[in-house]
Image (cartoon, rainbow, N blue to C red):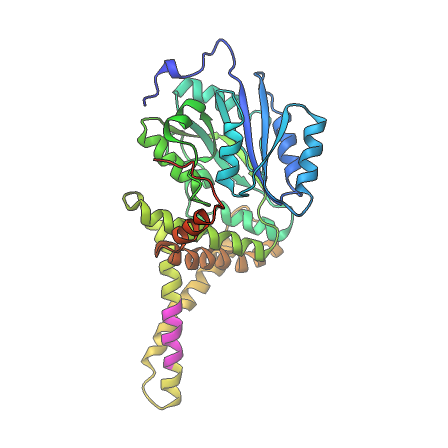
Amino acid sequence: MGTSASEVPSSGTLPGVSYVMPVLNDVTHVRAAVDSLLGQDYQGPFDVAIAVGPSIDGTNELVEALSRADSRVRVIENPVGSTPAGLNIAIQATQHPIIVRVDAHSVLPPEYTRIAVETMMRTGAGNVGGIMDAQGTTPFEEAVAAAYGSRIGLGGTPHHVGGSEGPADTVYLGVFRRDALNDVGLFDERIKRGQDWELNRRIRQGGHTVWFTPRLRVVYRPRPTLSRLARQFFSTGMWRGEISRRFPARNVLRYFAPPLMVLAVAVASLLGLVGLVQALLGVAPWLLLAFIVPVGYILLVIAAAITMPGVRGAAVRLWLLIVLPCIHFCWGVGFIPGFLLLAGNIAAQKYEKGEGSRVAPE
């Protein structure tokens, strides 16, 4: 479908907006996320649909209290618990022509919806989005946020580091026209991470425009511990491997950089250890040269931690020495089994057990 002016809400009357938010064990952040929605300066009608999964940290009780306090906030059960399932449930439970996708870890600035709708009216885009502005509250979180916003951390894509306004492959979160979503079939619930990129791929294939604007910046709160960060990036890498295998035409080199780096460092380290054995046996230890690769990677991380702009304090820079390898290696290690079908096989097994819905794409 195209993006003609007839498909874009009229500027004479502000279109209604539905905020959709999947939530699972997010009791620490969800109140701030919901407050940021209720505090938007957008003058059109709106409602909020929170799809809450089977949480065990008090999230369910908190969102129910938020719903009782404001009738515009509606809580919907998400028995599957996954992000794409929750998004689809919330989208299907709302009616407004504009869908604003919200993350429980995000805080929307007051002007976010107004700018997004204005941009949509001006461009006719099927999806409008901007930058994930990661901000931490502890030295560890600040280090994660700095890595998110750097080219050595997450590769330097516009929705992480910024760029010029215009058509894009994908954007952070997204403000969608409902008709564009209905055209392409909502989120693919078989893809647990990377579902935004995959949906935007179908939006573009359907003839709609995905529009990036740096005027939209959303505060994102990083994972607060190293173990949670490691799990996040292993899972992200695994599903990125699955997506890269399924859609090879859209692969770019940066997706393969972390797994190639992991393999290079691992193989070179093993060869270097063999070189040590050579030295002990009195054989020419030429394999010791392989240690150049892991030593070079360590020096690269140290240089990045020292020179990365915008980093405040020695504690944050010290954490970067751990955070950067955690992101690189967990993402890279996860990518390999994902690319070799493991992610897809796990999802297929869950569907066979009835643990997911098949509202998916094409």
Q: Residue at x 38, y 58 (%)?
A: 336
Residue 207 spot, x, y in % from top left: 31, 26
Residue 86 spot, x, y in % from top left: 53, 37
Q: Which of the pair 82/306 is nearer the observer?
A: 82
**125 left or right, relative to 205:** right
Q: Residue at x 49, y 22 (%)?
A: 98
Of all residues, the one furthest to the bottom in this rendering is 282
**211 left or right, relative to 19:** left
**75 left or right, relative to 342:** right
Q: Residue at x 36, y 65 (%)?
A: 264
Q: Is residue 45 above or below residue 324?
A: above
Magenta region: 266-275
Majority secondary structure of magenta residues: helix
Q: Is residue 214 above or below residue 179?
A: below
Residue 267 spot, x, y in % from top left: 36, 70
Q: Is residue 1 magenta?
A: no
Residue 311 spot, x, y in % from top left: 56, 49
Query: Looking at the image, how many numbered discs can be counted on the residues?
Result: 0
In the rendered image, which quarter contains the N terminus? top left
In the rendered image, which quarter contains the C terminus? top left
Q: Residue at x 40, y 25 (%)?
A: 180
Q: Is residue 271 magenta?
A: yes
Q: Which of the pair 22/136 is nearer the observer?
A: 22
**10 left or right, relative to 102:** left
Of all residues, the one furthest to the left in this rendering is 249
Whether residue 252 appears in this view of the structure is no
